[in-house]
Amino acid sequence: MHVLIVGAGKMGSAIAKELAADGVTTTMWNRTSEKLDALKSEISSPSFSTSTDLTSSVAAADIIITLLTSGKIVEEVLLAPGLLDACKKSAIIVDMSTSGVDTPHILNKAITAAGLRFVDAPVSGSMATIASHQLLVMASGEASAIDEVTPVLMKFSKKVANLGAAGNGQVMKLAVNLIVHSLSAAIAESLAIATKGGIAIESAYDILEESVVAAPFLKYKRGAFTNPESPVAMRIDTVVKDMNLIAALGDQLGLPLVATPAVLQAYTEAVTQGLADRDMARLLEIFQK
């Protein structure tokens, strides 16, 4: 089994590390070589290689996993002239990006027309959950294709859920992210109230962790909220991208969403205030001003 990961971002790199450590032949592709050079030193397994030639890489791969920043980019990469024709006819293409609900339908049509199989499989989790093999995969598409890729995906996941037709995975991912981003905004607003009211942020977080709102997300985001210098896990501009996808889906479904516009407005304001590349927890700075 030869797995190709398209996109050398944090999540893709973390998945490559787990697969290579398990002995799975894994290739990482990226448009530029800088990130690939760094990964070569991080992943010393003989199972791991890098490439900047996507056409030759897909020709050798049994499973092609895309982890890119938007559905538009996924479409541009996978639907480039001649790329699908270069794939093995037995290959399965798995999009694990948060691409929105339109992209999986576009990809499924083009990929199946090329005689290949497609799985829409966004995830819930982080680099830490990949390392602990606790990622949740929300898969949708042809059942046989999901069954075939599941053993590989389970090397870094706790569950691969089959949600039906291609596109359903993205619907569920946006539903999950609506809660994630709303919860993050609520934590930021809560801490702003507590600290402005005279309570030290560490003490306030202690109380939140002991209260009825102590969700796992709140617990593992503690460092991001209490220490402005913590590593970035999810950028604020990525949250804005997700919230725009959620708002568009709500419009498409005719739903009168209430939380979505407010959360989107708050994170959009953070972007205008120069916080686009900061972790989502730094929304706290907007409320503290």
Image: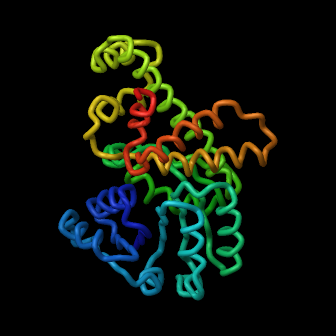
Rendered residue at 36%/71% (across/down): 28
Looking at the picture, tell me which residue is in the foreground, 5 or 22: 5
The answer to whether 257 is drawn above or below residue 233 in the figure is: above
Q: Quadrant of the N terminus?
A: bottom left
Q: Residue furthest right?
A: 254
**Residue 136: in sight, yes or no?**
no
Rendered residue at 69%/68% (across/down): 106
Horizontal relation, residue 1 to residue 96: left or right: left
**Where's residue 159, x and y in %?**
48, 44
Looking at the picture, tell me which residue is in the foreground, 31 or 49: 31
Please tell me in which quadrant of the rendered image residue 31 appears.
bottom left
Looking at the picture, tell me which residue is in the foreground, 224 or 266: 266
The answer to whether 72 is drawn above or below residue 125 in the figure is: below
Please tell me in which quadrant of the rendered image residue 256 appears.
top right
**Where's residue 111, x and y in %?**
65, 74
Horizontal relation, residue 225 to residue 61: left or right: left
